[in-house]
Image (tube, grey):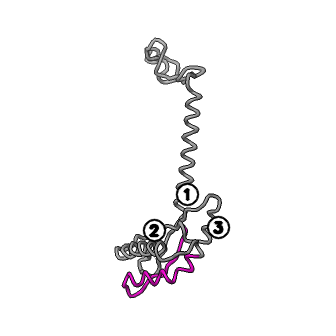
Amino acid sequence: MAEMTPKAGRLAAMIQRTVAASLERDFHDPRLRGVTVTEVRVTNDLHIARVYWTQLGEAGKERGERERAREALNQAKGRLRSKVGRKAGTRLTPQLEFVFDEVPAAAADLDDMLVYAARQDETLSRLREGKSYAGDADPYRHDDDNDDGAIDEDAGDGSGIGSDEAGA
């Protein structure tokens, strides 16, 4: 997605403030209770403004409340556009498109997964307390180590012939 021009960015910020204030102050529709405008993106030609919104609702009733809020926002679209037009003072007022913002819900799901993972880590660390490995802590053989600390001359080229024998 292309970045917004500075003019589109300023218009988007103004639309966000206007729509959020209007929803809070002017619309007394109970379906809009808990609706929050999270972001507004305006196309560079200033014709379309996508208003991203989210809603905090009762547990278990989110889907129905979201649908009712979507209906209420679509019904209020004309009045909101008129308010934006008066406030903006531009020749053309952008069409408002309301898009439900999935990011907060996805972030909450991610937070829940992180909390679950942290609990699992704590459980595993408690189970590991006082335990030791069945064998050596490092069970792998290293070619450069011998029991006496000397480097093995025969291990160098893999031929099995020491360096004294190879030259003779």
Of the numbered discs 3 and 2, the one sitting upstream in the chain is 2
Residue placed most toward the observer, 24 or 80: 24
First reached walking from the N terminus: tag 3 or tag 1: 3
Quick check: is 89 in the magenta stretch?
yes
What are the residue bounds of the magenta stretch? 72-100
Q: What residue is shown at x 41% (from left), y 77% (from top)?
A: 44
Instruction: Tell me which residue sits at (35%, 76%) in the image.
Output: 7
Q: Is residue 11 magenta?
A: no
**Contact (Cβ within 8 Å) of mark 2 with mark 1:** no
- The residue at 46%/11% (across/down) is 148
Question: Which amino acid type is marked by label 3?
Answer: Gly
Tag nearer the camera, 3 or 1? 3
Task: State yes or no: discs 3 and 2 in contact (Cβ < 8 Å).
Answer: no
Whichever of callouts 2 and 1 sits on the residue coming sooner in the sequence is: 2
Distance, label 3 to label 2, CA atoms, is 22 Å
User: Residue flagged by tag 2: what amino acid is it?
Assistant: Glu
Say which residue label 1 marks: 106
| Label 2 sits on residue | 39
Does 38 appear above or below 136?
Answer: below
Per the model, the C-alpha gap separating discs 3 and 1 is: 18 Å
Query: Residue 20: x, y in percent?
Result: 45, 71
Q: 11 or 131: which is nearer to us?
A: 11
Residue at the extreme left of the image, as rendered: 6
Tell whether 11 sits left or right of 65.
left
Q: Amino acid at mark 1?
A: Ala
**Relative image position of residue 113 (x, y in whole percent):** 57, 48
